[in-house]
Image (spheres, rainbow, N blue to C red):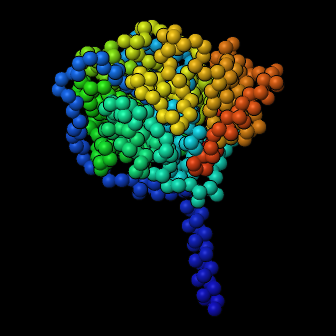
């Protein structure tokens, strides 16, 4: 009996030791579990694009429409805004040309401070909180890692809501409800040939994929990211952020792959942004004689930070390695935007093509670069201006005068209505569309502001913009921030104590909007601190401003 008791005791001790070892190395365990779920990737194969008519149709033709959506691009990452990466060391003449040759919106706002809800807003013309797509879809292993990891010397720790894991659908089921109508479907019904390139992140199961939501053709990846090249490729230069759990998750777990119209996954050919652009040029050529809609959404310049060696070598004046890789990625993205614009000119399509350019959210603080959103405070995942105030241009030479400027707030919610109106298409009658057609405002045919009030929400973190006044409310912190953006566009002077009546009125606006929203389709598993005035990798100091981000 004593012998069995000793054996049993030994087993208990061994299990406890293994559990302790696993906990001590939990990050490696989470990464290993995620890594073993990676799919098989076939070798590269050619893509054959559907060919339109060999000859142009006669009569008036509706405009082609191209939406170019950069990923995690900061307000200061282009030289149009007077700065640029490394003090202007990385010019962005092609992206800048869209603002110079069309209309630049001084106050263009993202649908959300993170990628997927913004993309859902663009596709539907509706606040994503109206249909429960409130959080960015992410694997549980990712959320567990981020929610249990803290930067060295952290004063505020993230939390992981393990109790809600059982209520979280599998990753592929985290999708926009199938009842939502996407702009691609509206334009397809109007006779447009519709194409998607790059990142999707709105659902990977049948019914939610691009080819099920109105896109005739789709080349890209369904998840939130991809490698630009294999890490060991001789033509790539990499930069890793050791303090960042997001970065530590991405490197071993992101595949280098694409799909075409739901095919098996296969490897791209070359650097991802170059490859997607190569194929987009072929698609424009194939559709030159019929109206087309192109949603061009490369993952540039989202992490992992990977640049081509040629672009990296072209920036020797930037001494900081991380900033140089980031700048090289921006250089590459701008060049590829230029290639797409040049193809339109070469085919005589540029005058009657509406090109919309923006970013899904502001620059990320976790890359450790302090000036990506300059002059604004905050980063991706915060509703300070740095997280949601992005470059926003529309070029349509046939309708919009070059050099136009528009100051009133507009946003991602307006892209749906603007594109539909340009095509002569009616929005769906069974849904309330939050956006408006911006062209009449830009051309002086409509007066007033497109929006008196705009909203953002991520869990307990909620924001309202009412005219020039912006109120942020972090219910988890029992804290509000109030700013008059007309007098203080960079949010330096907090006015909530001086304006208690305004605070109460704006909080009531948030409550009224919450009644129109629905419960999130899946629970928040992660709540983490994001400091406003310095990026990750910099030790926090007591008293510094931060928000708590729910996802």
In the image as oriented, which residue stretches furthest toward the left? 54
For the point 42% across and 53% down, the residue is 35
**Does residue 236 sit above or below 140 in this rendering?**
above
Q: Nearer the viewer, residue 248 or 211?
A: 211
Instruction: Say left or right for 225 vs 517.
Output: left
- Residue 201: x percent and y percent? 45, 41
In the rendered view, does 359 fall on the left or right side of 503?
left
Q: Position of residue 134 (x, y in %)?
A: 58, 41
Relative to 280, say whether 253 is above or below: below
Answer left or right for 55 relative to 96.
left
- Residue drawn where x is 31% and y is 38% of the image: 217
Say which of 45 and 414 sits in front: 414
The residue located at (46%, 42%) in the rendering is: 202
Q: Is residue 175 visible?
A: yes
Identify the residue shown where x is 30% and y is 17%.
60
Q: Position of residue 241 (x, y in %)?
A: 50, 37
Quarter of the figure with residue 165: bottom right
In the figure, residue 61 lies in which quadrant? Answer: top left
Quadrant where the C terminus sits is: top right
Quadrant of the rendering where the N terminus is positioned: bottom right
Q: Position of residue 256 (x, y in %)?
A: 34, 43
């Amino acid at each position: 009996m004593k012998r069995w008791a000793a054996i049993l005791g030994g087993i208990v001790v061994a299990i406890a030791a293994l559990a302790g070892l696993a906990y001590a190395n939990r990050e490696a365990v989470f990464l290993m579990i995620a890594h073993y779920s990676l799919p098989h990737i076939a070798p590269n194969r050619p893509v054959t694009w559907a060919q339109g008519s060999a000859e142009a149709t006669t009569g008036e033709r509706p405009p082609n429409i191209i939406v170019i959506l950069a990923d995690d691009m900061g307000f200061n990452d282009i030289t149009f805004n007077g700065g640029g990466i490394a003090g202007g060391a990385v010019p962005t003449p092609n992206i800048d040309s869209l603002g110079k040759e069309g209309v630049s919106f001084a106050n263009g706002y993202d649908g959300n401070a993170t990628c997927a809800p913004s993309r859902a807003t663009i596709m539907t013309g509706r606040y994503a909180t109206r249909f429960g797509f409130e959080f960015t879809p992410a694997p549980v292993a990712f959320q567990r890692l981020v929610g249990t990891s803290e930067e060295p010397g952290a004063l505020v720790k993230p939390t992981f809501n393990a109790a809600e894991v059982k209520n979280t659908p599998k990753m592929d089921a985290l999708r926009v409800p199938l009842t939502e109508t996407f702009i691609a479907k509206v334009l397809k019904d109007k006779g447009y040939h519709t194409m998607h390139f790059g990142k999707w992140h709105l659902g990977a199961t049948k019914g939610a994929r691009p080819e099920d939501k109105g896109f005739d053709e789709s080349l890209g990846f369904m998840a939130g990211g991809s490698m630009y090249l294999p890490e060991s490729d001789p033509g790539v230069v990499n930069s890793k952020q050791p303090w960042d759990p997001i970065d530590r998750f991405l490197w071993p777990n992101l595949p280098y792959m694409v799909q075409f119209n739901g095919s098996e996954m296969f490897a791209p050919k070359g650097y991802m942004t170059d490859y997607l652009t190569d194929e987009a040029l072929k698609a424009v050529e194939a559709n030159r004689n019929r109206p087309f809609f192109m949603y061009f959404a490369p993952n540039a310049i989202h992490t992992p930070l990977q640049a081509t060696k040629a672009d990296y070598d072209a920036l020797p004046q930037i001494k900081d390695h991380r900033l140089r890789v980031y700048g090289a990625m921006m250089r590459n993205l701008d060049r590829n935007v230029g290639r797409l614009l040049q193809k339109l000119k070469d085919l005589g399509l540029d005058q009657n093509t509406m090109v919309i350019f923006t970013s899904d959210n502001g620059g990320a603080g976790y890359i450790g670069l302090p000036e990506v959103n300059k002059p604004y405070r905050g980063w991706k995942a915060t509703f300070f201006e740095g997280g949601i105030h992005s470059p926003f241009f529309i070029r349509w030479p046939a309708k919009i005068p070059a050099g136009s400027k528009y100051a009133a707030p507009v946003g991602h919610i307006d892209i749906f209505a603007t594109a539909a109106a340009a095509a002569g298409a009616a929005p769906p009658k069974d849904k309330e569309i939050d956006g408006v057609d911006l062209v009449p405002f830009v051309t002086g045919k409509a007066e007033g502001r497109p929006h008196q009030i705009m909203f953002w929400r991520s869990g307990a973190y909620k924001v309202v913009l009412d005219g020039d006044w912006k109120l942020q409310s972090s219910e988890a912190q029992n804290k509000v921030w109030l700013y008059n953006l007309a007098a203080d566009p960079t949010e330096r002077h907090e006015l909530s104590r001086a304006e208690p009546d305004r605070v109460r009125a704006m909080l009531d606006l948030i409550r009224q909007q919450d009644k129109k929203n629905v419960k999130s389709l899946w629970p928040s598993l992660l709540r983490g601190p994001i400091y406003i005035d310095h990026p990750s990798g910099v030790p926090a100091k007591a008293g510094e401003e931060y928000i708590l981000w729910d996802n």
